[in-house]
Image: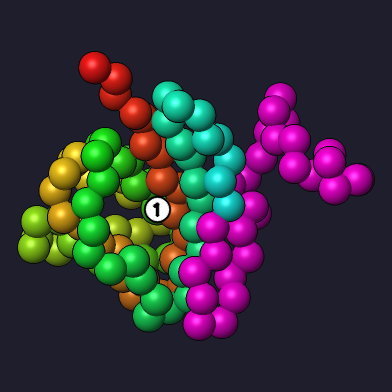
Amino acid sequence: MTEEEKENLTERVIDPRDLVIYQPGSIVSRMLIYTKSGTITVFAFDAGEGLSEHTAPYDAVLQALDGEALVTIAATEYHVKAGDLIIMPATIPHAVHAVTRFKMMLTMIHAGP
């Protein structure tokens, strides 16, 4: 399979867990969709890694694919594990901290005026 074939994911059945590989001490991400309408990104976190508290202008849907993490939204912690989904509301501070190695898919739909 060529590099171009690997990158073109349209009309393919894929397991999103296979799209990013764990790397020691790192967070790895791969953007699958990037349009003005929204984004879909897959992340792999090594245990103990995380995204510090931040806000986003749009709601974000986090779907846990593998492992466990703590998701903090407006200072409330939520434990998520593979198979769980949580919605992080727009403009509300949130963070992600991997308890174990953790993979997630993040979907943001960009609402227009």
Total marks drawn? 1
Residue at 63% in and 65% down: 21
Residue 4: quarter of image: top right
Identify which amino acid the numbered label 1 is placed on.
Ala
Taking depth in this image into account, of 4 and 61 the one nearest to the observer is 4
Residue 82: quarter of image: bottom left
Taking depth in this image into account, of 86 and 90 the one nearest to the observer is 90
**Whole-percent x, y for residue 76 in the image:** 9, 61
**Whole-percent x, y for residue 62 in the image:** 34, 47
Residue 2: quarter of image: top right
Please indicate, yes or no, whether residue 70 appears anywhere in the rendered image. Answer: yes
Region rendered in magenta? 1-29
Please indicate, yes or no, whether residue 17 appears anywhere in the rendered image. Answer: no
Label 1: which residue? 64
Q: Is residue 53 above or below residue 108?
A: below
Taking depth in this image into account, of 3 and 105 the one nearest to the observer is 3
Q: Is residue 27 left or right of residue 19?
A: left
Residue at 37% in and 36% down: 108
The magenta stretch spans residue 7: yes
Q: Is residue 113 above or below residue 45?
A: above
Structural crowding at the residue carrying mark 1, measured as other residues with C-alpha within 10 Å and reported as few (<14), some (14–19) or many (≥20): many
Residue at 41% in and 45% down: 106
Residue at 55% in and 64% down: 28
